[in-house]
Image (cartoon, rainbow, N blue to C red):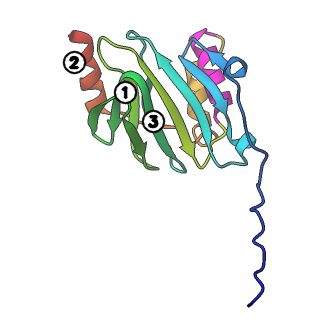
Amino acid sequence: MSQMTPVSAPVRPWPPVLVRAGEAEQLPAIGHVLLADAPATGGALTSHRIVLAPEDSGAIPHRHDGSSELFYILGGALDVLIGTEVVTAGEGDLLVVPPGTAHAFGPHRGCGADALVIATPGIERFEYFRRLVRIRAGAEPRQVLTGLQDTYDTHFLDSPAWTAARAGSAAR
């Protein structure tokens, strides 16, 4: 009988990450809960949760060139731009947006939305979300993000399909 060589356990490139619900950074001004940013996961992923009220706007059209973005709908319904099409994702739905694809999101008309969002590989984005809060509060000009699109791999786009869909939602 031949001897078997024991298989070594894989080496983790970063320690396990546990974010307790009460310890996650809350950004209620933009409906975000920051869970794990890229540095904490060795660049493997970035994760946050969006909790949007019916009147919230969500995210404007943009793309990420280096990461896919996964949306898992925990509750409510989320309108999502994917390329030139707008779809509605409901509770239990999963959507993965590939790199380079135009997308945007906001709560479906008349309801809120609760979703887990994961970008992989990770994008160091938590400071981007904090900047959004400062911009909304008037502490920074919106134009500051234009010069940081490469830093956060968030490139803003125009989308007639998204504009039309959101105008239609507001009119109903």
The disc, 2 or 3, on the residue closer to the chain's N-terminal end is 3
Q: Nearer the viewer, mark 1 or mark 2?
A: 1
Residue 40, image x, y percentages: 74, 40
Residue linked to disc 2: 168
Q: In terms of depth relative to the viewer, which is nearer, 165 or 146?
A: 165
Tag 1 residue: 91
On the rendered image, what quadrant is the N terminus found in? bottom right
Q: Nearer the viewer, mark 2 or mark 3?
A: 3
Residue at 47% of width from left, 41% of height from top?
Answer: 70
- Ranked by sequence position, the earlier of labels 1 and 2 is 1
Q: Quadrant of the C terminus?
A: top left
The CA distance from mark 2 to mark 3 is 23 Å
Q: Secondary structure at mark 2?
A: helix
Residue at the (54%, 39%) spot, across then down: 118
Query: What amino acid is at disc 3?
Result: Phe
Query: Mark 3 highlights which residue?
Result: 71
Tell me the kind of residue under disc 1: Glu
**x, y percentage for residue 38?**
68, 42
| 38 relative position to 48: left or right | right
Which image quadrant for residue 25? top right
Q: Is residue 132 magenta?
A: yes
Q: Secondary structure at mark 3?
A: strand
Seen in the picture, residue 149 relative to 111 is either above or below; the reply is below
Q: Residue 2 versus residue 94: which sits nearer the camera?
A: 2
Magenta part of the protein: which range? 125-138
User: Does the magenta-highlighted stretch encompass residue 75?
Assistant: no
What is the residue that sits farthest to the bottom in this orientation? 1
Instruction: Say whether residue 25 is left or right of residue 116.
Output: right
* Residue 63 in sight: no
> Alpha carbon of mark 1 to alpha carbon of mark 3: how far?
11 Å
Instruction: Classify mark 1: residues with Cα within 10 Å, few (<14), some (14-19) or many (20+).
Output: some
